Amino acid sequence: MLHEFLNANRGLLIDRCRDMVASRSHPKLPRPERSHGIPIFLDQLIKTLMNARGSREPDDGVDWEVAQVAALHGRDLLQEGFTIEQVIRDYGDVCQAVTQLAAEARVSISAGEFHTFNRCLDDAIAAAVTEYSQQNSQIALTHSEAALSAAKLDVREAQWRATHDSLTGLANRELFDDRLAHAIALAARHDWTLAVMFLDLDQFKSINDAHGHTAGDAALTTIAQRLQRYVRDEDTVCRNGGDEFLYLLMNPRGKKNIEQIANSVLRTVALPLAIAGVQLAISPSIGIAIYPWDGLRGDQLIANADAAMYIAKKYARGTVFFASHEARGMTA
C-alpha cells in the first residue's frame, strides 16, 4: 500500500517538500525548485519499493534496499557540501510529507508500514552521517550525533501525529483498525474471543451549546484521560471522531468479564466533570460486538457495535447493549 501511495502522489509529495525547503530561513541552494535532490530521491525510493513487491520476504527486501538508496542519497549530499542538518531536514521533510498527506487523504496505510519506512530512513541517516563523520574530526561526529538524535525525535513525533488524535492523544481510527486486524489474526490462531465496544456520549451537543466548544473539548480530553488510565496494556481505545470512542478488548474470557469491564468503563466516564466552573455529568451509551459471533472482520465488528450502541441510546441511555443474541447468551 505504501509504494502505491508514494507512486500515486509523487507530484504532491515533491511540491510539499519543495515548500518546506523554500520556507527555511537559510536553504543551502538559491533555487528551491531543486529541493536538495528530493524529486530524484523520491523517484529512487518509489522504484525500489515497486521492485520489492514481488519479493517472498517483502519486509526484509524493502528495509534493506530502501535504506541503501537513502544512505547513498545522504552520502552524496554530504559530499556535495550540504551540512548534516540540511540532509537530516531533507529526510524529515520526506517523512513529514508522506505522513501528513496520508492523514489528510485518509489513506489506510498501516502504522506498521509507516514505522518500517521511518526506520529505514533513520538507519540511512545514521549510515550516511557515520561514513561522512569518519572522514572528519571528532567534533563533526559529536555534532552529527546530536543532530541525528533530534531528527529521529522529529520523525517519531511525525509518526505519532499520523496515528493519534490531536485533541485527546488517543489512537486514531487508522491505528485502531490496524490493531484490530492484528487482534483478529491472533484470535483466529489461538481461538480467542475479542470485544469491540462503541461508546457515544449522551446529549454531548448540549454541552457545546451551553458552554462552548472549548468546554466540550476539555470534557473530551478529560474523558479520554480516564479511558487511557483504565485501559489494559493489551487493549486499545481510540477516538472515533466527535464524541464517539472505540474500545478493543483482547481475549476478555467470557461475557461476564466483558460486561463487568463495560459497566466499569460506563461508571468511570460518567463521573462528574468540573468544566468551565460548573459540574457536568456525561454518561455514555455502549454497544458491544464480540468476535467471532458478531463478525469475522474489523469493519463488521465495529458496525455491529455501533448498531448496538444506537439501540442502547434509543431505549435506555447510559446503558450497555450486546449486539447479537448469541453474544448475549454466551457463557462466561
Image (cartoon, grey):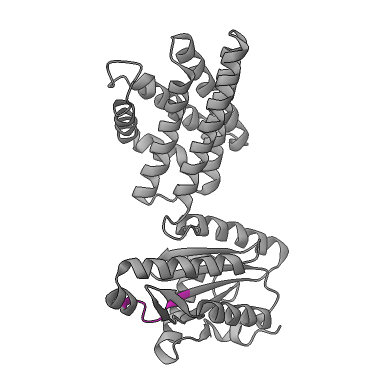
Q: Which residue is drawn at the image coordinates 52% and 48% (left, top)?
A: 111
Q: Is residue 109 visible?
A: no
Image quadrant of residue 280? bottom left
Q: Which residue is drawn at the image coordinates 42% and 32% (left, top)?
A: 94
How far across and how far down the image is residue 60, in percent?
62, 33
Q: Nearer the viewer, residue 184 or 16?
A: 16
How far across and how far down the image is residue 250, in percent?
65, 66
From this view, report whether residue 261 is shown above or below residue 12: below
Q: Nearer the viewer, residue 160 or 311?
A: 160
How far across and how far down the image is residue 227, in percent?
55, 69
From this view, report whether residue 323 is shown above or below residue 48: below
Direction front: furthest residue = 277
How far across and how far down the image is residue 253, in percent?
70, 75
Direction bottom: furthest residue = 315
> Does the magenta segment cover residue 7?
no
Image quadrant of residue 315? bottom left
**Count of labels in the image:** 0
Q: Is residue 37 visible?
A: yes
Image quarter hosting the C terminus:
bottom right
Q: Which residue is drawn at the image coordinates 53% and 73% (left, top)?
A: 197
Query: Magenta segment, which residues?
Result: 199-205
Q: Which residue is drawn at the image coordinates 71% and 67% (left, top)?
A: 191
From this view, report whether residue 192 is shown above or below residue 39: below
